Image (cartoon, rainbow, N blue to C red):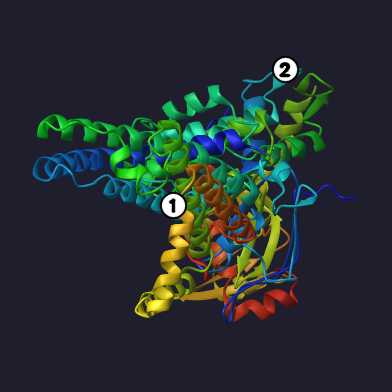
Amino acid sequence: MRIKPLMKYNLITARFAVIVFYSCFMVGTVISNVTIAATSPSTPHNTVSIVGFLFFVVVYNLTAPQKSSRMLIARSASRKEIFVSQILFMLPLSAFMAVLQIITLYAAGLLGSTLSRTEWTGLRFDLQTAIAPDMDNVLVFFAVSFSVFVCFSAIGYFVGACISRWKWITYSVLIVGSLVFFSCLLIPDFFTAVWEAIKFMLFDDDTAWFIVLKQLALAVPFVLAAFPIIRRITAVSSSTGSN
Amino acid sequence: MNNYAIEIKGLTKTYGSHKAIDNMSLSLEPNKIYGLLGRNGAGKTTLLNILTGRLFADAGKGNVKVFGSPVYENVDILKQICYVEEKGFYSGVLKVSDILSVVRGLYPTWDMEYEKRLLLLFELDTRKQYRQLSRGMESSLGLVIGLASRAPLTIFDEPSLGLDAVIRERFYSEIIEDFTENPRTVIISTHLIDEVNSLFEEVVIVNDGKLLLKADCAELKSKGFYLSGREEAVRKAAEGAVVLSEERFGGSLTLSVYSEKEIAPTEGAEVQPMSLQKLFVELINPMIHEQLVKGGIVK
Amino acid sequence: MKAILDGSKSIFIQICEAVEDGILTGEIGEEQPVPSTNQFAKHFSINPATAAKGVNLLVDEGIIYKKRGIGMFVAAGAREKIRRKRKQAFIRDKLNELLSEAEKLDISKAEIIEIIEREM
């Protein structure tokens, strides 16, 4: 398998995306955190930026199987090589984003507390109480972010694979599905069930390492399910073909 | 065991109710340059896409082998195939140098020194982003990739799109130059028939998703003639040849004919060779298709 | 030797004629090497197989011969052979053309002879 050149392609395409995303996001996060810290010093405010990073990995992995795959098939790469390289690439990308996230949160937090002349409590204040007791440890925080990114990447990749193979069917299913889902949220029992599920996946009373485990366990089936879909994608602009 | 570079049997590809490829069988020998000719929509690109594993044939319809093995998910075969399409799928923000650095790693036969020479020859600025390339520069990038890959099966689909005459001429002499040193199987699909046909050893003509003809290019070309002059003299000279079309102008008659044998000029009948492009246009004419099939000229 | 191809005839016939012309004018002497198929192909940007066809025609006619592993050479007596062949073709094609054109223009036999004697 020719994994090296394919990883290189993933790296150079991601490079642009990361630079663009991060330069906008970093500025936004710092400004918003500084403003919030200055106005109401005691509010937890870091979760907003976590959503931003999640959004990035999802979007990146949504588009990867669509755009990159077509180019790589056109350059004589096999579907298996493409799949393996894209799945493998999720790991360094998630790790890198997790590191970037920590840097951003610390930078924004420090800057915010300096400006508002309050004592900075590290990540403890925001995350330890909300997510898991050991979240104040940088290593644990990194592991949790990393696993959540991998999990969301896997889900994004699976959906992206579906789009690249059955474009309009997937879009219809996604739209109808989310309409049904959000309507059902109005039912109190359903809402509670969903909330419980999210709590189960993202919070833990004992240790954050369980969160890591749960996230990675969820990522695996999505990755496995994406493979047979990727194996049958074509490199032609639309599934009905052009001549 | 025959050693075809490409072997296609009973290939069919349908889009809805339209048959893009209709029960096509075709074998190409290794280390030859083939010209793939056909009108737009004749099925050329679909054929090439299936051949290179980019697209799938209809289920159970078609056995396609490249260098003796199926292509699909076959890395050993895939890395021997370089198909340069009309339009690359590269991400627009990538620089030419980025694209080359990736593509280089995909072909074990890639020649880095040759790549450098080609970049100069085709005047390509590697610092440019893909989206900044003009149509001609995009084609040039394709030429660099196709040639430098030295892939045992190299395919160019409309390689000269948007290229100026200077670059086109450079491409023609470069491909022959490199082919004589490093023989490989080359397929060139083109509409510029008269300009490119001296590169071909054989031509493959497809029409309506079917194989119409596969023949030695120089021989095929030497079979087309124009006969013109006085009607009876022209008719007499055309005996034994297949008349493709006729045209009257003033008192004279001009026949386009296909003849296995050389036709000598006679008293009252002038003979002129026909260009391959003209011959191609005559041969795909649906009006005389039946007649050509009967004459054994096309399939 | 003619170094440019045109569209008037088959490429391999033109290659053939180019070599013949070279031999006739003495550019390539007998027992001298002839460019290889690949050299022809590169020089004219044509498919080597087509160039080989032209060269093989000359080999078949005994005008050039192959020395295994070394290349191709002009055969002894090739010049004379070409001259004879061309002469026949000249009479068959060019003279006949001249005569039929003369007929169209009502030029008499005596007149033609006179012109030829004056020009030659």
What chain letter is assigned to the residue under label 1? A
The residue drawn where x is 47% and y is 43% is A208
Q: Are marks 1 and 2 in contact (CB under 8 Å)?
A: no
SS at badge 1: loop
Residue A226: image location, x then y, percent: 59, 58
Does the rendering let one see residue B156? no
The foreground one among B274 and A123 is: A123
Residue kind at label 2, given as amino acid type: Gln
The residue drawn where x is 70% and y is 57% is B215
* Residue B27 x, y percent position in the rendering: 76, 56
Q: Position of residue C57 (x, y in %)?
A: 75, 39
Q: Share a chain, discs 1 and 2?
A: no
Task: Establish if B268 lies above or below B142.
Answer: below
Report the side of B119 relative to B64 (left or right): left
Q: Pick the residue in front: B25 or C114.
A: B25
Residue sitting nearer the eye, B263 or A28: A28
Please tell me how crowded label 1 is: few (under 14), some (14-19), or many (20+) other residues with Cα within 10 Å: some
Q: Residue at x 68, y 71 (%)?
A: B58
Query: Relative to residue A44, is residue C82 depicted above or below?
Result: above
* Residue C32: image tag: 2
Instruction: State the separation of the CA atoms marked 1 and 2.
Output: 90 Å
> Can you say whether B272 is above or below B100 in the image?
below
Disc 1 residue type? Phe
Q: Quadrant of residue C83?
A: top right
SS state under label 2: loop
Read off the residue under disc 1. A203
On-image quarter of the C terminus of chain B = bottom right
Residue B261 visible from this viewpoint: yes
**Most foreground residue, B238 or B274:** B274
Q: Chain of mark 2?
A: C
Left or right of A170, for residue A228: right
Q: Nearer the viewer, mark 1 or mark 2?
A: 1
